[in-house]
């Protein structure tokens, strides 16, 4: 299937999902919430989204620098902006990650370090969402709070142990010549990164994901939705993880289905929650479109930088 046909199919799937969710929750409450958003609040949310993602670009650069690659800040910003736009046309956020990595691959000096750093950056974001979700369960004094926290800690420890094993165990000896050389470069890059880089990257991920959550909460409060922080920590984290699945156009429809299923247990009016989720989705689309335009129009191309 061609790339264009794939994009069209994902758009169609998204529209079908949205229509099904809106029909399920009822159109009356949906319409009143949708029309209540302030244009100024929406514009402010788009601006905040772009500022926060500038921070995300620097966090990504911090991760790949820790593995031994090096790119200028301007190239990191340009590539990350292109990745934001690519999220809507490529398979989930993974496609956007591949696009931003590919834009600076030649200029990084150490491609294996860039690839490992980019993968680590995405895993840290997923871990941050797990932490926010666990904090939400703890704040609600949910009986399952302990399970969520234990699962998050266990997952983080498992990732760290797996990372260290992959860096120390000589598994590259099992590979044929060309792959063995590539694997060895990956192992060297993984052994080089200090734990302080991973810890600071995780802390930055939690702060940036929390900032995006706060912007969404303030936008929703202006539309009349409850501002229960614990409920938002749970619902927003779960919906964002669900939107990572490569099923629709930029997560459209999948995120709304997750919100609809979580709304009642968390005390949100279901129709209003879905309407607000679509408003937030419009912020993502507008922000990604603006970032893509800036990346395309900004002067200069990713340059070749020396490795540190």
Image (cartoon, helix red, strand yellow):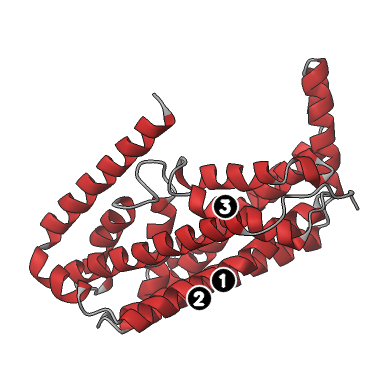
Q: Which residue is mark 3?
A: 82
Lower position in the chain sequence, tag 1 or tag 3: 1
Of residues 70 and 188, the one drawn nearer to the viewer in this rendering: 70
Residue 152 visible to an observer of this rendering? no
Which residue is at a point 62% across and 48% down the rendered structure image? 100
Left or right for 176, reference 218: right
Compared to residue 106, the image places residue 215 above or below, namely below
Viewport quadrant of the N terminus: top left
Disc 2 + disc 1, Cβ < 8 Å = yes
Compared to residue 218, the image places residue 187 above or below, namely above
Single out the mark in the foreground, 1 or 3. Answer: 3
Element at badge 3? helix
Which residue is at a point 91% across and 53% down the rendered structure image? 308
Residue 56 placement: quadrant: bottom right
Q: Which residue is mark 2?
A: 48
**Residue 78 position in % (x across, y down):** 65, 57
Which residue is at a point 44% across and 67% down the rendered structure image? 145
Which residue is at a point 18% across and 54% down the rendered structure image? 21
Element at badge 2? helix
Left or right for 246, reference 100: left
């Amino acid at each position: 299937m061609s790339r264009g046909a794939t994009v069209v199919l994902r758009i169609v799937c998204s529209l079908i999902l949205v229509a099904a969710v809106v029909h399920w929750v009822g159109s009356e409450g949906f319409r009143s919430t949708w029309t209540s958003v302030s244009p100024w609040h929406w514009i402010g949310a788009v601006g905040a989204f772009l500022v926060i993602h500038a921070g995300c670009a620097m966090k990504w650069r911090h991760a790949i620098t820790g593995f031994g690659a090096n790119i200028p800040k301007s190239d990191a910003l340009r590539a990350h902006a292109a990745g934001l736009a690519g999220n809507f046309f490529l398979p989930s956020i993974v496609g956007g990650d591949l696009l931003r990595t590919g834009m600076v691959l030649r200029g990084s000096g150490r491609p294996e370090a860039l690839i490992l750093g980019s993968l680590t950056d995405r895993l840290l974001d997923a871990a941050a969402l797990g932490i926010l979700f666990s904090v939400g369960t703890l704040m609600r004094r949910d009986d399952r709070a302990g399970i969520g926290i234990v699962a998050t800690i266990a997952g983080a420890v498992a990732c760290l142990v797996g990372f260290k094993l992959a860096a120390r165990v000589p598994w590259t000896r099992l590979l044929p010549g060309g792959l063995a050389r590539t694997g060895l470069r990956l192992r060297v890059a993984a052994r080089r990164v200090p734990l302080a880089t991973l810890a600071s990257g995780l802390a930055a991920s939690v702060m940036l994901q929390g900032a995006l959550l706060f912007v969404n909460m303030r936008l929703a409060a202006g539309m009349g939705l409850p501002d229960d922080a614990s409920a938002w920590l749970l619902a927003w984290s779960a919906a964002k993880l669900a939107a990572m699945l490569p099923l629709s156009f930029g997560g459209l429809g999948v995120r709304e289905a997750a919100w609809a299923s979580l709304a009642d247990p968390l005390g949100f009016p279901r129709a209003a929650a879905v309407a607000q989720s679509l408003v937030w989705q419009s912020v993502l689309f507008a922000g990604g479109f603006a970032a893509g335009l800036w990346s395309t129009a900004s002067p200069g191309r990713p340059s070749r930088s020396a490795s540190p």
